[in-house]
Structure formats: C-alpha cells, structure tokens
Amino acid sequence: MKKHSASPVSFGLWIYILSDCVLFATLFAAYAVLHAETATGPSGAVLFSLPFVLLETLVLLTSSFACGMAIVATERKSLAGIWAGLVSTLLLGFGFVALELHEFRGLIAEGHGWQQSAFLSSFFALVGTHGLHVFVGALWLVTLLGYLSVRGLTDRLAGRIRLFALFWHFLDIIWICIFSFVYLLGSLTL
Amino acid sequence: MKRAPATLRNYIVGFLLSLALTLASFFAATHLGIAAAVAVVALALLQLLVQMAFFLHIGEEDGAHWNLGMLGFVFAVLGILVGGTLWIMSNLAHLHMHSPTPTDLYEGGIVSPAHELH
C-alpha cells in the first residue's frame, strides 16, 4: 500500500465507518428507549433463543478471523492463502445472513413481526440494518474475488482487501454490541 | 513508514480472546440470572477493546493521529446521542409516572391544565 495513494482512501473509509457508527448509535438508542414497549406482546426474554444467537455470533466472529487470515496472506503475497481466507470469510458471512433470515422468518411466522410492538419494530430495525450491512459487505467481497480471479493480486487489490477487512471487522464489532446489549441483556429481564 | 503489524499471532490472539469473552458473557447470561448484567456489559466493553486493538489495529496505521482524532470525536457524538436520548426519555417517563385520572383528561386524551399545575 503506497502511502500517498492509499491513505486518503482508507481515511475516507474510516470516516464512513465512523458515521455508520452514528447510524447504529441512533438505532441502539431507539431500541434502548423502546425495548420495554411490548404492547402486551412477548418481550425479548421470551422470544430470543440464546444458543442460536451464540451460533450466529461464532459464525460472524470466525468470519472476521478468516478475513484477518486473508490479510496476513496478502502481506505474504500468498495467493492460495488469500483465496482460502476470503472464500471462508464469504461463506461464513452468507451463513450468518442465512441464520439471521431464519431467525426473522421464525419470529414473523409466529406473528411476532415488526408490526406487533414498538419493541419489535426497533429490534428489526437495528438487527436488520446490521444484517443488511453484512449482506452488502459480502457482495463487495464477491466483486473483490472476481477481480482477484481475473487480474490476480495487484497492489491495488491488496489495498482494497485491506479496506474490506476494516469494514468487515467493524461489522463484527457492531454485532458484539447487538449480541451483548440486545440479546444477552434482553434475556435477563425475566 | 510505520505499518500496522498484521501478523498471524496478532489475529490468533485477538480471535482466542474474543472467543473466550463471547463464551464467558454467554454463560454469565444463561447461568447467573439478573446479576449477570454488569458482567455482560463489562465483557462487551472488553471485547470491543480487544477487537479494536487486535483486528482493527487502531492507532498503529499511517496518519494514526487523524484516525484517532476522528474516533475520539465520534465517541463524543455517540455519548451525547445515546446518553442524551436515554436521559431525555427517562425524564419524560418519570414525568408521566403519575398517570392522569379520567377527570384530568379532556376528550381525546389531552391532559388538562389543572393536572399540569401539580
């Protein structure tokens, strides 16, 4: 990564990520205010299945780690390592989205969609926005893999992989907040 | 030029620490009951620090002072945003705690001036 060319871009991505933090903070604040407003419907303590959410968390955390492995391989210019790292990242990322959609579908099928209560509206808004980020990040990764398969590892692509990793690690950090503050704390209010 | 140390060891340590913290807060929440709230919050904050240090390499990249400056600014914004929201809304809930009796209401559910004088 050449300092003069890549630095403004990575600084720009950094500013985007920080402004995305503000977006998530508003959603967290809305959830914190509304989480008790269940409108005679069930609360999070009744709805959340913690073992399932733990599985989601481990899948996303492992995906973040696989992305780190791809970065290590990029530093070492090991093409096989980059492929292994990025493809694992992608599969685990899509796996996470699939698990989340499965959870959402279960909730909606039982009549606990976003229209039932303010609690569920803010829950779906917060968790759904994160899931959308993961999905879009996975699409970004597909384009990187396409570039890699056509042109091989260029300096430019190495820089882009580093930018992607920054975004992907950020999404895992947001998920840690959702896992802890929404699911784990939500399950305690029995 | 100082480069972020994207070493294998760094990522493995970060991954193992995150894994341990995740499992610890999961078991705290499922086994300790309501007392686990403090532990869950503390473990979450710890894990944020671990991931920022070992995965994002905060403060070790080029132009670190700019990145850190932005980070500090955004943390201040987050504090005002989340803290302020909770403060205002809890105040509002507190003021509405003495729910008006039907005689305090006009038609349409508006609280009467007499009620507001209390």
Image (cartoon, coloured by chain):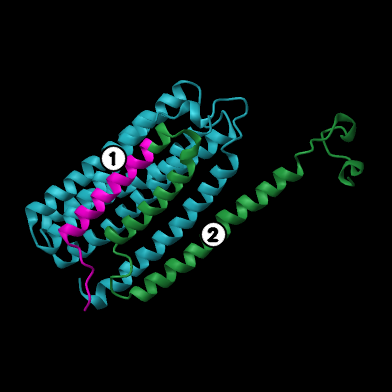
Chain colours: A cyan, B green
Q: The residue marked by circle 2 belongs to what chain?
A: B
Mainly helix, strand or loop, the magenta region? helix
Residue A123 vs residue A87, the one in the foreground: A123
Q: Which residue is mark 2?
A: B79
On the question of residue A149 being in view, the answer is no
Residue A18 vs residue A16, the one in the foreground: A18
Could you say whether the residue bearing mark 1 is in a helix, strand or loop? Answer: helix
Horizontal and vertical percent position of residue A10: 31, 67
Q: Which residue lies at the image location 90% right of the left edge and 44% below the top edge?
A: B113
Total label count? 2
Q: Quadrant of residue B59?
A: bottom left
- Look at the numbered discs 1 and 2 and tell me whether their residues touch, using CB distance below 8 Å: no
Separation (CA) of disc 1 from disc 2: 28 Å
Q: Which residue lies at the image location 70% right of the left edge and 43% below the top edge?
A: B93
| Boundaries of the magenta span | B1-27
Horizontal and vertical percent position of residue A168: 30, 52
Q: Quadrant of residue A97?
A: top left
Q: Which residue is mark 1?
A: A58
Horizontal and vertical percent position of residue A32: 56, 44
Could you say whether the residue bearing mark 2 is in a helix, strand or loop? Answer: helix
* In the rendered image, the vertical position of residue A144 relative to residue A32, given as above or below: below
Q: Is residue A83 left or right of residue A24?
A: left
Amino acid of disc 2: Gly
